[in-house]
Image (cartoon, rainbow, N blue to C red):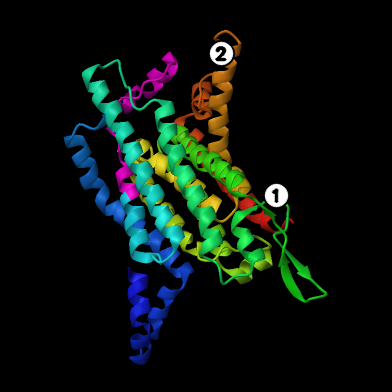
Amino acid sequence: MIYYLYELMKDWLDAHGMGFFRVFGYVSFRAILAILFSFIFVILAARPTIRWLIKMKIGDNPEFHHRDLNEIMKQKANTPTMGGILISVAILLSTVLLANLQSFYVYMAILCLLWLSILGGFDDWLKLTSSRRSPDSREGLKFWEKAVFQTGLAVLLGIFIHLHGHTKFTDFPSELRDMSHSLTLPFSKSWIFDAEQQRYITNVIVLSAWPFILLSILVITGASNAVNLTDGLDGLASGIMAVCAFAFMVLAYIAGYEPLAKFLLVPYIPLSDELAIVAGAMVGSCLGFLWFNCLPAQVFMGDTGSLPLGGLLGYIAVVIRQEFLLLIIGGVFVLEALSVIIQVGYFKFCGGRRFFKCAPIHHHFHILGWTEPQVVVRFWLISALLAALALAMLKLR
């Protein structure tokens, strides 16, 4: 909205000596502004929201299939959950205010945000209402039910993104349009400088529709569920997500700015730089939420926050063709998801024996004797190091 107003009035502003407003034309400025706006919004809205959640008796009662863990976590009973409402609203408002709403990728980001926020909110609500009917029951949506809606969204996004690359960028050479369908492998170059013709030429593996859609499903649903599994300790998911979202804010800006994309030899995706504003809003909202979610947490994000945060991260990775970098940047999320898969598989094939003390893996370390702040801060540090490594790998080609 603000960007649209600027575009509408920029000639008048320049003519009347207010050319300094041209900063709103820069994606980098609006992305930083999105961090600040979403952070301030969550800080201001958190206390009224927490009071409302308490009034509505929307409190969590964490229960695990592990006696020691239940004993450790019992002090968290009745902490308000569904605080992800704050995160989702902050991201939505920041995006609508600051992003270029003429960008197709922004529309799809809003669809992803709303779809998964509603799905997560419904799941949280079912858990809470079932626990009120029966104290021993916390039945929300079954895994396959959530997977159906997550997969449905990922299929839609994959189809629209793939079609958009064919139909929208008709003014670009076909080889440049292919970049929006490319498979970006580690240490590979998306651009090669042709010394004979003195110009850059593309060097990509082009995915047809079905492989592209399948990869979109794996990345978007996988990221959404991985963040959901990580949300188990005070400040853990929100802190890691702030780090990952900042890294993807940088990557989205690079992918949408052709000189930088050529310099760093990564795919150039026109208008994808507007997703830097979405990622910036994710950073600010997570930092604002962390203010109230750090130990001892005054509110939990619940599935209402974790599902859309992970889904958006996966969506941005698909658009800018950096799915493999997502595996590195979100390495802690990947580890959390793998620990659950290993635990379940080992339990089934070994007659009830456990590979970890408890899964996801953050509970394993907690039970081993690490304090909650130790687990959380150490996982934050690992995430920061992985993000730095991923950004450094942009030049290792």
**Residues shaded magenta:** 61-88
Residue 266 found in image quarter? bottom right
Question: Mark 1 — residue?
Answer: 186
Residues 204 and 189: in front is 204
Whether residue 77 is in magenta: the answer is: yes
Q: Is residue 18 left or right of residue 355?
A: left
Sequence-first disc among 2 and 1? 1
Q: Residue at x 40, y 29 (%)?
A: 145
What percent of the width, then of the height, locates residue 210? 58, 44
Whether residue 21 is in magenta: the answer is: no
Q: Residue at x 38, y 65 (%)?
A: 101
Label of residue 340 in the image:
none
Residue found farthest to the top: 351
Identify which amino acid the numbered label 1 is placed on: Pro
Task: State whether residue 380 is above or below residue 127.
Answer: below
Identify which amino acid the numbered label 2 is placed on: Lys
Q: Residue at x 35, y 38 (%)?
A: 119
Element type where label 1 sits in the image: loop
Instruction: Specify few, some or many for label 2: CA neighbours under 10 Å numbering under 14, 14-19, or 20 or more.
Output: few
What percent of the width, then of the height, locates residue 211? 61, 44
Residue 260 found in image quarter? bottom right
Can residue 268 be seen? yes
Residue 195 found in image quarter? bottom right
Question: Dividing the image into 4 quarters, which one contains the C terminus?
Answer: bottom right
Q: Is residue 121 left or right of residue 186?
A: left
Question: Mark 2 — residue?
Answer: 348
Q: Residue at x 43, y 16 (%)?
A: 65
Residue found farthest to the right: 196
> What distance separates the C-alpha of mark 2 from that of mark 1?
34 Å
Question: Dividing the image into 4 quarters, which one contains the N terminus?
Answer: bottom left
Q: Is residue 88 left or right of residue 69?
A: left
Residues 219 and 67: in front is 219
